[in-house]
Amino acid sequence: MTGVLARYEALIAAGELRADPDQRAAAVRLDALQQQLEAAPERGSTLWRLLRKAPEPPRGLYMWGGVGRGKSMLMDLFFDTVKIPRKARAHFHEFMLDVHARLAEARKSETGDPIPPVVEALAENARLLCFDEMVVNNMADAAIMSRLFTGLLEKRVTIVTTSNRVPDDLYKDGLNRQLFLPFIDLIKDRLDVQTLNGPTDYRRDRLGDATLWHCPNGDEATAALSTAFFRLTDYPPSDRAHVPSEDIPVQGGRTLHVPKSLKGVAVFSFKRLCAEARGAPDYLAIARKYHSVIIVGIPVLGPENRNEAARFVTLIDSLYEYKVKLLASADAEPAQLYPQGDGAFEFERTVSRLMEMQSDDYLALGHGPK
């Protein structure tokens, strides 16, 4: 059976990744964790009963480092490689939204503490939980995380997470931070802390000095964006006809089709995103899922297509909130995208955001809400 380390080294040999000592050290640790998880007996199995007591779960991992250092790539590699029946992976912000929804339901049906039944349900579904982009930026999350994760670890759930911050900097300067400090102690006590903080931001490095906003629409812009897609994903251009698509969940039980989806990068046409009936839940689902989004075919906007313009404003707001990298082709530069007429004044904030999203300071930010 192929392990995480073998798959990582195969990617280097194929030229899809560069050798990186921090990444390799994390791959070694994840490979060992894979072996431990696959060797551990499943709850209720014959071996479990013979042991007469619950075996200790494998120790989890907290991988932290700057933007684009390969944390999410290694998380994906590990999650895809480990062969156990009960596992789950989610963007951390998405996971916490789900937890708060579960807590709200538990409060309706339970007279006591709502956290234990939520922990029980989560542990029932997965003995491995993987979270990408752990960040804590509100008191509602901070107040429950210590008890929530203590409960999960007591239920023998193994946790693997990535973050742009060292544990001691989580929720730094946050309101009532003292309520959160036990969670930091819990991470350092129950998870191994692995640093991936080499000198290269591979995500930014792959973009190089590439133009992010291409004008006008046409074959030249499409070709440039196609090249950027293959650089961002290390996907061979010879396989361009086989780029995978994906259906991602949207709040409310719907799904959204993503025509091209690979390694955290999505490609859409403006028509698919803004000419069809879509709203904030669709755009937030995209922003949470993808660190980079490519949009082709943006037209000049105005009162005659105000619905499309309004959706585009909501889309950009969502991408901006989650610090998503945006590459696009359009019939005009941002400042001339909505040149005149009713709504042009309100569009100025979107123009400002589109300009900021091309700056080095913005591109250096990590994916996720701030």
Image (cartoon, grey):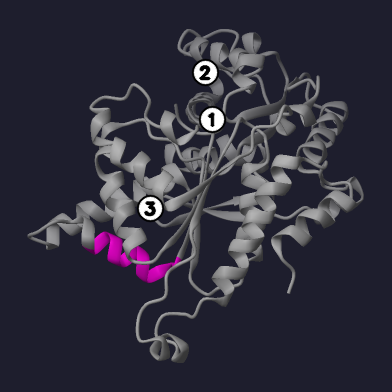
Residue bearing mark 3: 252
Residue drawn at (69%, 48%), measured in percent from left and top? Answer: 25
Earlier in the chain: of badge 2 and badge 1, it is 2
- For mark 1, what is the residue? 319
Q: Secondary structure at mark 1?
A: helix
The residue type indicated by label 3 comes to Gly
Residue 156: which disc? none
Which residue position holds label 2? 303
Q: Residue at x 52, y 18 (%)?
A: 303
Q: Residues within 10 Å of mark 3 (few under 14, many from 20)?
A: few
Location of the N terminus by quadrant is: bottom right
164 vs 40, nearest the viewer: 40
Q: Is most of the magenta stretch helix, strand or loop?
A: helix
The amino acid at mark 2 is Pro
Image x and y of residue 186, in percent? 36, 47
Write down the quadrant of residue 10 in the picture.
bottom right
Disc 3 vs disc 2: which is toward the camera? 3
In the depicted structure, whether residue 146 falls above or below residue 335: below
Separation of disc 3 and disc 1 at Cα?
20 Å
Q: Residue at x 41, y 52 (%)?
A: 190
What residue is rendered at 74% in x and 33% in y? 202
Q: Is residue 124 magenta?
A: yes
